[in-house]
Amino acid sequence: MKVRTLRPTKVNVVTLGCSKNTFDSEVMMAQLKANGIAVDHESDSGEHNVVVINTCGFIDNAKQESIDTILSYAKAKDQGLVEKVYVTGCLSQRYAPELKDGIPQVDAWFGTRDLPRLLKTLKADYKKELVGERLLTTPAHYAYFKISEGCDRKCSFCAIPLMRGKHVSTPMDQLVTNAQGLARQGVKELILIAQDLTYYGLDIYKKRNLDELVARLSDVEGIDWIRLHYAFPSGFPMEVLDVMRDRTNVCNYLDMPLQHGSTEMLKRMRRGITQEKTEALVATIRDKVPGIAIRTTLIAGFPGETQADHDDSLRWIERMRFDRLGAFTYSHEEDTHAHTMADDVPEAVKQERAQEIMELQGGISLELNQAKVGKTYKVLVDKAENGHWIARTEFDSPEVDNEVLIPFSADVHLRIGDFATVRITEANEHDLRAVVA
């Protein structure tokens, strides 16, 4: 029989999924620390007696990774390596009733908006005065910056509204205060995230207010870069492009998931836009912000996708020449509108189409990168490894985009979190090599 220990609580937070989960984990960790509870992020020291797993439930692969992680810590609990296992996040929000009977080792399950209840379970108080405080898990010079929660869009494939609820904007004054706090900590880059940035303000200001928010954030002293992630194309607030063009610390970068190039597929996906309108939008964005880098993501194998739809999308990708593009295969999600459709594209075909998309984009990315050789860019140094400083330009987001590799040199002295001016010497599909200019 296991003997209950009197060890003080020491929590290990494990984060799965997207940057929004990273943000949520950082908020949770700050609350725990403020309550005098020792907390680490994804530690392998073996010193923690409590594990909190922040799960993802977006698509099949992400759900499986979350389940495997829970099972791993359930086994650790059986072996006496941890005393308590708690699960929170999107998978828990959506599937806790189905999972709890099969994984009895989990002591409690929490949803995406259950932080006060989770803290209470850990004998901690939710401190309202800490709103905006976080323990960063990213390098100290950049931070993900969530401006709203939830989503009101009706995309037929997406279960996010089921897990995150309706759209709720964070008040602008609070966000500015949060940004000022991060700047005082040494954060130089804010990466704005939300389920849909472009919806910001509609609920509390009765208008799309992303442009005013970005302008006010750009006024925060110490914030050198502001980057926009996850913009929805339908109803895009054009005013933010003026801010992006006019403010030097707003990166000429936009992450705008478009999901497909075929009008028929966009209709079935309930995206509220056509191929022609998408092309016109991208053309306007590029005209208003010359040199902007656009990242997008596409879904391969959506229900009803024919070879003609796929071929149409490939031709569209060739015309659009996105700077960055990712593709993933369709996942048939319960309780979504698309789940009422037949999942009629075989998995092998989905994989083949996704591969074709990425191969096409690979050639485009190579051409665009090679055009940078000989040019100079301002870069931000993220880390040092394998004899190189690893940096990014304003056109690259961490983890998902190009890295700029700068070889160590006796006469070059850089630090993580420094900006530098470099000249590109080589380029391949994914990375750039450079020397300090």
Image (cartoon, rainbow, N blue to C red):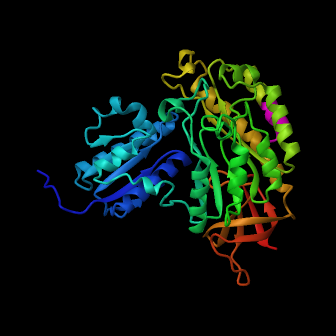
Residue 251 percent coordinates (x, y): 75, 55
Magenta: main secondary structure: helix
Residue 86 percent coordinates (x, y): 33, 46
In this rendered view, identify the residue nearer to me: 430 or 119: 119
Q: Residue at x 58, y 53 (%)?
A: 144
Quadrant containing the C terminus is bottom right
Is 318 one of the magenta-colored residues?
A: yes
Magenta-highlighted residues: 314-322
Residue 43 visible to the viewer: no
Where 138 sits versus 310, above or below? below
Q: Residue at x 78, y 50 (%)?
A: 243
Where 127 sits versus 158, above or below? below
Residue 336 visible to the viewer: yes
Q: Residue at x 34, y 46 (%)?
A: 118
Is 110 one of the magenta-colored residues?
A: no
Residue 396 percent coordinates (x, y): 71, 55
